Amino acid sequence: MAFHRYLRGRRPALVCLCLLACGALGFASCARADNPGYDRPGIGFTPVVLGAGQVTLEQGLLDASRDRRNGASMSLYSADSLLRLGLGGPLELQLGGSPYNRLMVSGAGNHYASHGRGDSSVGLKFALPATGSAFSWGLLGNVELTDGARDFRNDRPQYLFGAQCNLQLDARNSLGAYLQDVRAGGRDDTELAVSDNLTLTPALTAYAEAGLLHVPQRGAGSLLGGGLAWQPTANLQFDAGLDRGLGGAAPQWQVNLGASIFFGR
């Protein structure tokens, strides 16, 4: 069952959406307008940390992946959560998890379905304060534990290290590059991704991304995709993204729908 562990490591919907929307409206009066941005959507993260005492909740409403291996079709549906806490200076604490997952396997004489909670993670992001330069960068490290349900937990803790670099070309367009290594049991999963982000309106942003990855015992793979992020208010964002595997170790499809709230302080 190694398939679902790889997919889940990648980053009821209506109830979550309502709670997030209500939370944003309820905290609008106390949230500050200087939102530094969200780590959702897409591969990588924003190379900016929250200010001291600021809080952001980023919630996947539907994070789904589909692949086919050894004649069997495998689909994973999850609701990934990320809580970001500003520590002050260049540091940000991140607490993650997936409270709900559902795995379905069918074909090749194998029919199986399971659901349960995924593993928890704790991480630390480092990013220097903005200096007015068009170039920015950040580092992220976290450890994913083995406390999830049987079908949704790792065999051993996973240690992630990621580096993100962004270049602001002009007021509307920016480029990004992300490098990630996940180590577990003496083996390394690596990924390199590049992205282009375009501001369509003050509230709507589009992005395109391409990634190369290498998974132990499965080899290399590649994917291509993109999506949209919509911010109806300064402290609320909805996002949607789709990635298509182009071959190799990459899953056939990845779909992401989510919402994020910036609470300020």
Image (tube, rainbow, N blue to C red):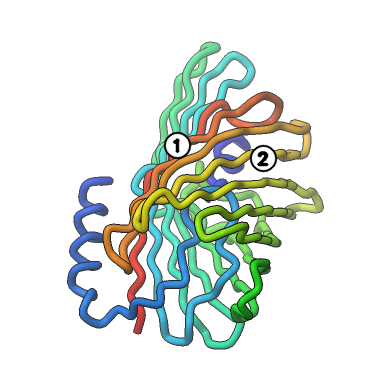
Report the residue marked by disc 1.
Answer: 255
Which structural element holds mark 1? strand
Image quadrant holding the N terminus, namely: top right
Q: Considering depth in this image, is 59 or 127 the residue closer to the camera?
A: 127
Relative placement, left or right, of 53 versus 211 is: left
Amino acid type at circle 2 is: Gly
Report the residue marked by disc 2.
Answer: 211
Q: How crowded is mark 2: few (under 14 residues within 10 Å), some or many (20 or more)?
A: many
N-term mark: 2 or 1: 2
Determine the residue positioned at 53% across, 87% down: 88
Determine the residue positioned at 62% across, 21% down: 69
The x, y position of residue 132, in whole percent, is: 61, 77
The x, y position of residue 37, in whole percent, is: 46, 66
Relative placement, left or right, of 102 versus 21 is: right
Which structural element holds mark 2? strand
Determine the residue positioned at 60% across, 81% down: 129
Determine the residue positioned at 60% across, 28% down: 245
Amino acid type at circle 1 is: Val
Can residue 117 be seen here? The reply is: no
The x, y position of residue 184, in whole percent, is: 73, 53
Residue 181 appears in which quarter of the rendering? bottom right
Pointer 2 with pointer 1, Cβ within 8 A: no
Image quadrant holding the C terminus, namely: bottom left
Q: Considering depth in this image, is 257 or 81 the residue closer to the camera?
A: 257
